[in-house]
Amino acid sequence: MADADGTLTRWKDRAMKLLFVIDSLGSGGAQRQMVTLAVGLAARGHTVAFFVYYPEFTHFKPALDAASIPVFHEQKQSRFAFNVPFALRRHIKSQNYDAVLAFLDTPNVYVELLRLSGIQTPIIASERSADVAGQPLKRSIWLRRQLHRFADHVTVNSHHQRQRMEREFPWLQPKISTIVNGLDLTQFSPEALPTTNAETVLLSVSTVVRGKNPQRLAKALALLQQQQRPVPRIKWAGRIPDQAVDDSYQQTNVILEAAGLTHMWDWLGRCEDIPQQMQAADAVIHPSLLEGFPNAICEALACGAPVLAADIGDHRWLLGDGKHGVVFDPTDVTAIAAAIQQFMTLSPAAIAQMQTAAREFACETLAVDTYVTHYETLLTRLIA
């Protein structure tokens, strides 16, 4: 839509010069989403550059090199180092960017504080996590949100988080929006050999920590066994931290051993074949107690896998109110067991319908092209 003098119309086909600011190019979800966006925009003819302050982490740098996207850096010297924002300011002033986009809390702070130094380049700050439901904000988070007053726009990747921020900071409403993550629908797809599981297999994909709730899932299996109901096989793919950091792995094993169910639970550790694991499972189960916008659920939907998920954040929306899976209270072992039982009693026709609906939703909502278009439209509007 054009504005009164046609400015937006004139900008619509103009190449933009953009700077993306993030902590590093390490193997994180925020880094993957920012690199995906940059590569997508570069493919559309826009000029994109990165600015990072932990240059030693380079997991995604080959993807940027392949797209001829340069990476500038200033090594952060300490936790409260001032050299990074000063270097960032010098770089922006020397390069004449059309807009600056930051992902994650500290990069947001650095970019938003540039307003106080006279930088007028349009700024987008993006939050990539969710506040804990039912808990008041920490003062440090409240203060960071106040800095959003200096941003031209703020994006979040979940509807739930946007709604909460709008309630707590009404002044944000005119300049905050949800842009959900983009997903490679060729990498994550239903293409696989027909599943021939002799038993129901539920796959969970996450680091083995308390917040991901493996203990309650194990207790749900024990409850199903006590009720003399079928028990599914759990395959858990994800890093297992040292016990000193988090003892969830050890505590879950104690529960399984007490119930005699260790043979029904496979710890897969880190996996490089997550799409294949999802394609081979009957469903993905995600009992997490806290999530922003969960990559595991999105990837499962793209693979055409039904999902059993905690009823938190955007999960109910992602599952289409039951069209793509089942939601449950992650704090209630009985509710988790009931959700598993509900799925295991579905007819093959009902499961096939879930699989089709899941893939269709992913194609309509989670495609990389859609994700890039949303940011391209927003950037064009702000610059115009």
Image: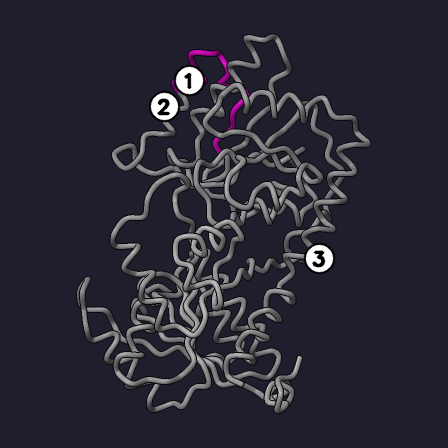
Compare residues 288 and 267 and report the one nearer the observer: 288
Assess disc 2: are there few (<14), some (14-19) or many (≥20) residues with their C-alpha within 10 Å of its C-alpha.
some
What amino acid is labelled 3 in the image? Answer: Glu
The residue sitting at 30% across, 61% down in the picture is: 144
- Distance, label 1 to label 2, CA atoms, is 7 Å
Residue drawn 67% across and 52% down? 362
**On residue 364, which mark appears?**
3
Q: Crowdedness of circle 1 by 10 Å Cα count: few (<14), some, many (20+)?
A: some
Q: Is residue 280 visible?
A: no
Mark 3 Cα shell of 10 Å, populated few (<14), some (14-19), many (≥20): few
Of the two numbered discs 3 and 2 in the rendering, the one whose residue sits closer to the viewer: 3
The answer to whether residue 256 is magenta is: yes
Q: CA distance from mark 3 to mark 2?
A: 40 Å
Give the residue number, with chain letter if any, for mark 2. Answer: 251
If the image is split into quadrants, where does the N terminus sit?
Answer: bottom right
Residue type (three-letter) at the residue carrying disc 1: Ile
Badge 2 amino acid: Gln
User: Which residue is labeled 1 in the image?
Assistant: 255
